[in-house]
Amino acid sequence: MGKPLQPLSRKLGVALVGLGQYASEELAPALQETQYCELRGIVTGSPEKIPEWKDKYGIPDKNIYNYNHLEDIASNDDIDIVYIVLPNSQHANYTVRAAKAGKHVICEKPMAISVEECDEMIRVCRENGVKLGIGYRLHSDPYHQYVMELGQGKFGQLHKVEGEHSMLLEDPDAWRLQHKFAGGGPLMDVGIYVVQAACYTVGKDPIAVREASFGEPTRPEIYATVEESIQWTLEFPGGVLAHGSCSYKKDADWLKSEASAGKWSLEPAFAYSGIKGHTTEGPMQFPEVNQQARQMDEFALAVLNGEDTKVPGEMGRRDVAILMAIYEAAKTGEAVPLNL
C-alpha cells in the first residue's frame, strides 16, 4: 500500500446497494470506524427500511435511491464508491450500472455467477475509468495475512492445504437455495473462502481440479436446484494439493496447512471476528480488527492514491473460473484443467 494522503480534504462517500443482513449488521457499523470513507447513501427496493437508516446514520433524502433509478447517482458528488451487497445473480448488473454512472465499485463475493459476467464487469469498469474491488475481507485480517507469509517458505516446502467452511441453513425460502439467485449452493457462498485461502496460502493459481463430488442431499426437497454439500481437490504447480469442502448441513470453520518443517492452522478461520491460529512454534497472536472497516479503507486509499486495488476484479474472475471448474468436475467425475 502506498503512503496515505494526509491530511484528507474529505472522506470518500460510500453508498450501500442492498440493505440486507450483511449491509445492516456488518458494513454499515464498520463504516462508522473507517478513516478514509464513510456511509453517505443507500440504494434499496424496500421503502420501509428507509426511515431507520435515515435516523440511524443521518442519510439525507438526496442520497437515497431505489434500484430502478441507480443511474441518477451519477450526478451526486457525495457518492464516490458504490458497494454491491445483493444476491449473486445481481452483482454483474449493478456493478455495470454503477460503473457507467462513474462510481468506483466494491462487489461482494462471489463476483458473479459466470466468468462471462466477470469479464463484462471488468471491461465496463475499465472503460469508465473506475476501480473495481471484490469484498474479500480476509485479505485485511492479520491472521490470514500471516498465513500468506507462512505458505511462502517459513516452514519449508509446502505440501498440502486443507479447509472447510460450512454453515447450517434451514430456511427453505432462503434465496441461497435458488440457483437463479445464487448461481449455486454453499460453494458459491462459503466454499469460496476455502478456495481463496488455498490460493493465497500457496501463492499461485491452481492448474487443475483433480477430484470433486457432490454429497448426497439430506433434504432433497429444498436442494432441488443447488448442492447441499460438495468437496474438491485443487492441484497447484509443484504438486501441492488443496482439499476443500463445504455444506449447508452443519457448522464448520477451519484451515490447515502442512510443510516440510512445520504446520499451521486457523480455527475458526473465516469468521468476522474471534479467529484463532496456531503454528508448530506456538499460538498466533494478533490484534482483533474490524475486517470490513480495514477492507473498505484499503479500497478507499487505492482510489485516493491512484493505486491498484488489493483484491481486484481479476482475482474475483479467477475464483469464479475455479468454482465453475469444481462444479464441472463434480458433475462429470473427471479432472478439469485450469488455464487461469
Image: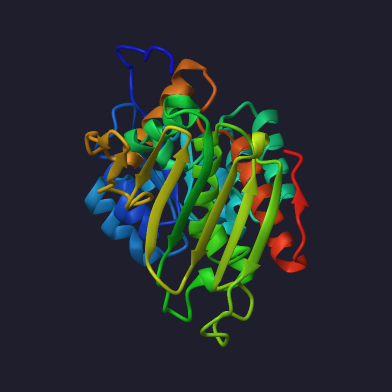
Q: Residue at x 43, y 32 (%)?
A: 261
Quadrant of residue 235 in the image? top right
Q: Residue at x 49, y 43 (%)?
A: 197
Q: Is residue 179 left or right of residue 169?
A: right
Q: Position of residue 318 (x, y in %)?
A: 65, 41
Residue 222, compared with residue 8, is above or below; it is below
Residue 41, compared with residue 129, is above or below; it is below
Quadrant into which the C terminus falls: top right
Q: Residue at x 53, y 44 (%)?
A: 160
Q: Is residue 288 left or right of residue 317?
A: left
Q: Is residue 287 visible?
A: yes
Q: Is residue 182 left or right of residue 143?
A: right
Which of the pair 193/97 is nearer the observer?
Answer: 193
Furthest-front residue in view?
261
Quadrant of residue 9 in the image? top left
Q: How many marks?
A: 0
Furthest-bottom residue in view?
221
The colour scheme used here is rainbow
Q: Position of residue 87 (x, y in %)?
A: 53, 60
Q: Is residue 299 visible?
A: no
Q: Position of residue 185 (x, y in %)?
A: 56, 67
Quadrant into which the N terminus falls: top left
Q: Position of residue 284 (x, y in %)?
A: 26, 36
Residue 236, compared with residue 188, is above or below; it is above
Residue 66, compared with residue 227, is above or below; it is above
Q: Is residue 112 left or right of residue 40?
A: right
Q: Residue at x 51, y 59 (%)?
A: 189
